[in-house]
Amino acid sequence: MSKVILAIDQGTTGTTALLVDHQLQVVGKHTEDFPQHYPEPAWVEHDLEEIWQSVLKAVKTVLEKTATAPSAVVAIGITNQRETTALWQREGHGKPIGRAIVWQDRRTAEFCRQLKRKGLEKKIQKKTGLLLDPYFSATKIHWRLKSDPELARQAKLGKVCFGTIDSFLLYRMSGEHKTDVSNASRTLLMDIHTCQWDSDLLKLFGVNKSMLPEIHASAIVYGKTRGFSVLPDGIPISGIVGDQQAALFGQACFEKGSAKCTYGTGAFALVNTGNKPVFSRHGMLTTVAWKLKDRVTYGLEGSAFIAGAAVQWLREGLGLFAKSADVEALATSVPDSGGVVFVPALSGMGAPHWLPDAKGLLTGLTRGSSQAHIARATLEGVVFQVNELLAAMKKDTQKKLNPLKVDGGAAENAFLMQFQSDISQIPVIRSQIIETTALGAALQAGLGVGFWESLDEITKKWKADRVFDPNMSASTRKTKIESWDDAIRALKVLS
């Protein structure tokens, strides 16, 4: 049996296990969903045990479905939802301490405002590349420790581990408490120049250094499986990378200036800025893309918090269709949105506006507005958000982003991809492997054990599925963007 790399993609709503062979062919994949928990408005939590069970079941099932022997797995790569904040007991097998606070959660918005009023945002951005927003991990850790004095006491005694989801999974799979630079760069606690935890930031957020995982390069052996019930002991876990950076890697965006957008729960655009960080003046985030050996690659990122989640809302909240894939047929059953504009700020607004308290806005409704118009406006709203991200990146890098590689579940929606190309006026290239986030983790893991020798080898094997070229008149595009801009102005007034 041919050798494979196992990638574990632990996402916001489900866990995907992907098997990849040496030719970059997907041998098999399986996704296990798990519950979301909403204890209060604007709060989003995950049960770590439910996540862990989804990992076990996804890996077990993909091996069974493909009749892959565990001995065929050469190495394991992990990619994950990034800023989601997990705490667990250091002793034993990593027993969770409460639920994880998800990246979408907005409970720390007031704390972020307090820090901004103290004039700390620019100082923090200079060190971390990030802005003060509930999105990131540090404010969530601060909230947990402040809300639970006993937890804070245990943390001071060194009995509590913090990690993003990659660290939690690694701990459960191997007993190691480590993370990679890409995940660490999303915590508000790492200096992106040194790629080390920063003592001033730890003090500001009240975080004990003993809680934190060791920071390492992305493609190294972090540890080996030990007590991971679905696989034998001794398999190297040799790649860890945050989900959006993994997608950039999985799209073979290895050159400076190459860019991708992943359409998942949210929409995340990321451009490779080379070996020096570029600091945004237009609401983007500076992040570490990955580190291979001693070489750090940086990225400029824009995040729209709601993309596929808006389609999920249409399905579950409004009951417009039975399956998310049905949205394309409904949206294209009308020639346009009929003047309806939807700003999908269902969890606040991310880049470039950063409005944590914003609410979704639906404008332009008339008696002639139908379910189809609302569905189309929802998809268009996702595109308009991404277009704003790309425009901001263009200003920051002073270079046109051309083309844009795309992936994620919603990238299978041809209408969405064509509309993105039309509005952003750039070719949109869809990867042959939609699961490029998992692919990126597999590639990192393979590089970590020499399964692939170089980035050049990977580039030669990477394949596109389809290219969408711009095909919209300038006047139509101008009118649509003006309608979106009007809606954003209205949103800001209401927020």
Image: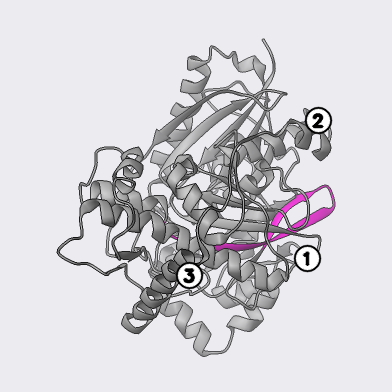
Which circle, 1 or 2, is nearer the viewer? 2
Which circle, 3 or 2, is nearer the viewer? 3
Q: Earlier in the sequence, mark 1 or mark 3?
A: 1
The quadrant where residue 299 appears: bottom right
Amino acid marked by disc 2: Gly
Q: Is residue 396 left or right of residue 45?
A: right
* Residue 265 or residue 257, whichever sits in front: 257
* Residue 90 or residue 212, whichever sits in front: 212
Where does the image place residue 402, in percent across and percent down from the top left? 68, 56
**Pointers 3 and 2 in contact (CB under 8 A)?**
no
Q: What residue is shown with label 2?
A: 450
Rounded to the nearest angstrom, the CA distance separating label 1 from label 2 is: 27 Å
Which residue is depicted at the point 27% across and 65% down?
Answer: 41
Q: Secondary structure at mark 3?
A: helix
From what the image shows, is residue 442 above or below residue 373? above
Q: Which residues are magenta?
A: 287-306
Residue that extends furthest to the bottom in the rendered view of this protein: 118
Q: Is residue 443 left or right of residue 11?
A: right
Which residue is depicted at the point 51% across and 43% down?
Answer: 408
Where does the image place residue 294, in percent across and percent down from the top left? 85, 52
In reply to whether residue 351 is colored magenta, the answer given is no
Q: What residue is shown with label 1?
A: 194
Q: Quadrant of the N terminus?
A: top right
